Amino acid sequence: MNDHDAIGPMMARIGADAKAAATVLATVPADAKEAALIAAADAIWAQRAAIIDANKQDMAFGADKGLSPAMMDRLLLNDDRIKGMADGLRAVAAQTDPVGAVAEEWTQPSGLHIRRVRTPIGVIGVIYESRPNVTADAGALCLKSGNAVILRGGSESFHSSQAIHACLVAGLKAAGLPPAAIQLVPTRDRAAVTAMLQATDHIDVIVPRGGKGLVGLVQREARVPVFAHLEGICHIYVDAAADLEKARAVLLNAKTRRTGICGSAECVLVDQAFHDAHGDILTRDLLEAGVEVRADETLAQTVGTVPVQPDDYGREFLDMIIAARVVDGVDGAIAHIRQYGSNHTDAILTEDDGVADRFFRELDSAILMRNASTQFADGGEFGMGAEIGIATGKLHARGPVGAVQLTSFKYLVTGNGTVRA
């Protein structure tokens, strides 16, 4: 049997182990999960030198593959980022345990008392690309919500993910929890992805986290339900009533803070009235920061811009590139976003409450922001400790998917010899 032929049996074994672990996790006390996460955080920090050494192998692999600077930035781990991972684990550990929480309760005229309580989904499959921190975030959130998880990281982050996963397993063992609660697929072979997508006997939901190609593949081929994390085609609309200095600061942060994350702004829409009042100051700010501005006819009058192409709208650059367009007020912005957006995150910069309300009411993105950088589209920034992704679909979880969003619910009904007439 060659290595490829061995994938099926290996994935079946991983799935069966995860299902067994999920049964245990469903009734594990909250303090045991908290202890496991704190021990994992301690292990990640203690093993940071080994994690960085593993990451160096991945960075070399990524360079050989010709990854873009933004993608290499996604892949990079350093002391600050490892500390961020450890802090994220501790933040998740400190959250209230969602399992068993009563979301709603009431008593019927029949005398039945009904409670809707949160319950684990079971086994989560997470398929992700280059960002190795997803290993820690997804493992932590699934454990906190009482779910077992099967992680299949990208080929670029193979060694980093293994080093991080070893720390998560150390945390599980320290707390007396089954090591199979968090498993990492130990191969780069894409046959493992196919096996996960077909594993209806073992996996309850798949969470893809990556680019359009990965998400499209998962949505086409999965027989398991999917929480889709689609592209982050994030727009910023600068309204006529925007405060100039707020607009300058927010736009630069939204585009340049980290270009390789899904919350990076990919298109700026400028109200004609704002442009008439303030000229091309926003365009010049972007150019001076080193951003390539692909501009429409009006904004292209600024020296240094390049003409926008039709396929630049609705494109996730994940780089120091932004599409720019002048629009006719909030109606023009809404129409553009409806046509080209990905229902991820869109922002309005304005001091006009009425315009902001229209923007919030008439757009249906998972996250809508006012006078804030789209780089805040992140579960950690939402107080969730971490996130497993930004779900752009409309069923079950939407927006940042934290521990609470990784639970389902069941009804607990209590009577007193109650019979139905």
Image (cartoon, rainbow, N blue to C red):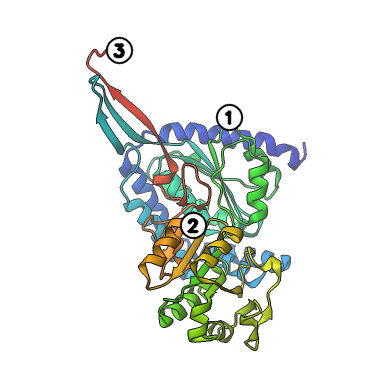
Q: How much space separates mark 2 and mark 3, taking CA atoms?
A: 45 Å
In the depicted view, which residue is nearer to us: 260 or 358? 358
Whether residue 67 is visible, yes or no, is: no
The residue lying at 53 percent from left, 77 percent from top is 272
**Foreground: disc 2 or disc 3:** 2
Quadrant location of the C terminus?
top left
Q: How much space separates mark 1 and mark 2, taking CA atoms?
A: 38 Å
Label 2, on which residue?
363
Q: How much space separates mark 3 and mark 1, taking CA atoms?
A: 36 Å
Q: Which mark is residue 315?
A: none
Horizontal arrangement in the rendering, residue 407 relative to residue 127 (left or right)? left
Label 3, on which residue?
420
Say what amino acid the circle numbered 3 marks. Answer: Arg
Secondary element under disc 2, as helix, strand or loop, is loop
Q: Is residue 79 above or below residue 367?
A: below
Whether residue 110 is visible, yes or no, is: yes
The answer to whether the residue labelled 1 contacts the one labelled 2, judged by CB atoms less than 8 Å apart, is no
Say what amino acid the circle numbered 1 marks. Answer: Asp
Quarter residue 71 falls in? bottom right
Say what amino acid the circle numbered 2 marks. Answer: Leu
Is the residue marked by circle 3 packed among few (<14), some (14-19), or many (20+) residues within 10 Å? few
**Foreground: disc 1 or disc 2:** 2
Which one is earlier in the sequence, the residue at label 2 or at label 3? 2
Q: Please state the horizontal and vertical placement of residue 292, each as a whole percent of the image.
A: 63, 79
Q: In the orientation shown, which residue stands out farthest toward the bottom?
A: 303
Q: Please state the horizontal and vertical placement of residue 310, each as a whole percent of the image.
A: 70, 68
Label 1, on which residue?
201
